[in-house]
Image (spheres, helix red, strand yellow):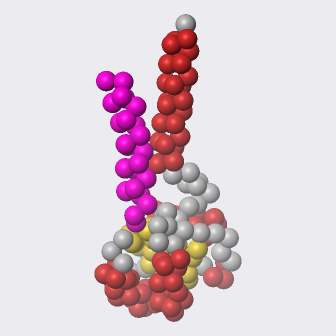
Amino acid sequence: MKKFLIFFPILFIFLTLFATAQESCIYYFYGISCPHCANVAPFLDKLKLEYPNINIIKFETYQNISNQNLLDTYFESYNLPKTSRGVPIIFISDNYLVGDTPIISGLESLILKNPNAKCPPTKSNSISTIEIILAVLAIIALIYFFFKKKFKTS
């Protein structure tokens, strides 16, 4: 039973890391009726077929105020100049591309440079849930081994 208690958290950690490391996360902000966004949409569909390990999360900003607020958070976190703010925009890892031409010409190279990109961070979500879980599990393991050693020597 004790071996299982040690083995299970370790197995969980490795499976969690393996599952999250196999997919690139891309945030795509767009607007309904935006002509530049309409140019990007088929390109993203093609990329998804060529690179099945990418996860493109789409946020419509013209009709969804929550998505617009999220986009504003990313604008601030990435220090985009006010003159460069708009849609379509892609965030991948610590990079961004604004406009249809930069996205179409530059996104594939960013995917290749960041094959296991985590979801783009903001100031508010710079520590992921998985990182918190792993830290808690590591602390639990350290406490377990500390007390196990202490009681064994008594």
Quadrant of residue 97 within the rendered picture: bottom right
Furthest-top residue in this view: 154
Quadrant of residue 62 within the rendered picture: bottom left
Q: Nearer the viewer, residue 139 or 78?
A: 139
Residue depicted at 67% across the width and 78% down the height = 82
Query: Main SS type for the magenta part?
Result: helix
Furthest-front residue in this view: 153
Residue depicted at 51% across the width and 51% down the height = 128
Residue depicted at 56% across the width and 15% down the height = 150
Q: Quadrant of the C terminus?
A: top right
Whether 90 is drawn above or below 70: the answer is below
**Residue 3 visible (yes or no):** yes
Q: Is residue 77 on the magenta stretch?
A: no
Whether 73 is drawn above or below 62: the answer is above
Q: Quadrant of the N terminus?
A: top left
Q: Is residue 2 on the magenta stretch?
A: yes
Residue depicted at 48% across the width and 77% down the height = 111
Q: x%, y% of residue 37? A: 43, 85
**Residue 57 visible (yes or no):** no
Magenta residues span 1-23
Q: x%, y% of residue 54? A: 39, 72
Whether 56 is drawn above or below 11: the answer is below
Q: Nearer the viewer, residue 150 or 69?
A: 150
Q: x%, y% of residue 64? A: 42, 68
